[in-house]
Amino acid sequence: MYNEQYNKKVSELRKLVSYEQLDIEKIVSLMKEIREIVKSVGDPLVVKTLRLAYENIEANKELAIEYLEDQEDLNNLEYFIDLLKDAQNKYNRDEIEDIMYALLGIPRPQAEEGE
């Protein structure tokens, strides 16, 4: 994706959140590292969403948003990290943006017709 270091950190993060007992401190620290990598390549959507996500995790000890409805085998955090694996994919970016708005607690603006 962005670079090999990014891919390695996202994979490490995904493994961390797969455990029954979450190490919130490690998860947040790793998300901050990933955010710095993304910041260096200039992707404001992912930078902001990562910040909002780790702030939410610090406050709630999980990614506490209403997002996934029918993904019984994944939680919101696992799903978000899976999207980060290919954050430049237009469909993933669309969902990352949805998650950003959910974290902000505001409805996503609707695109004007013809856009």
Image: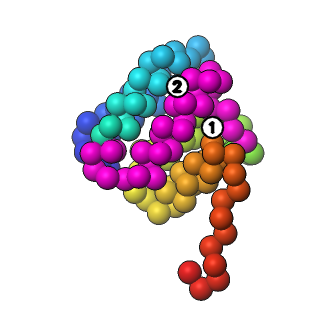
**Amino acid type, mark 1:** Asn
Q: CA distance from mark 1 to mark 2?
A: 11 Å
Residue shown at 27%/45% (left/top)?
Answer: 40
Give the prevailing secondary structure in the magenta stretch.
helix
Residue shown at 75%/45% (left/top)?
Answer: 69
Residue 82 visible in image: no
Between 110 and 80, the residue placed more toward the observer is 110
Residue 97, relative to residue 20: is it above or below?
below
Res 89 → quadrant: bottom left
Asked whether residue 48 is drawn in magenta, I would say yes
**Amino acid type, mark 2:** Val
**What span is colored magenta in the figure?**
38-66
Q: Is residue 57 left or right of residue 42?
A: right
Question: Mark number for residue 76?
Answer: 1
Q: Do the residues under discs 1 and 2 have CB atoms within 8 angstroms? A: no
Q: Position of residue 115 (x, y in %)?
A: 56, 81
Res 13 → quadrant: top left
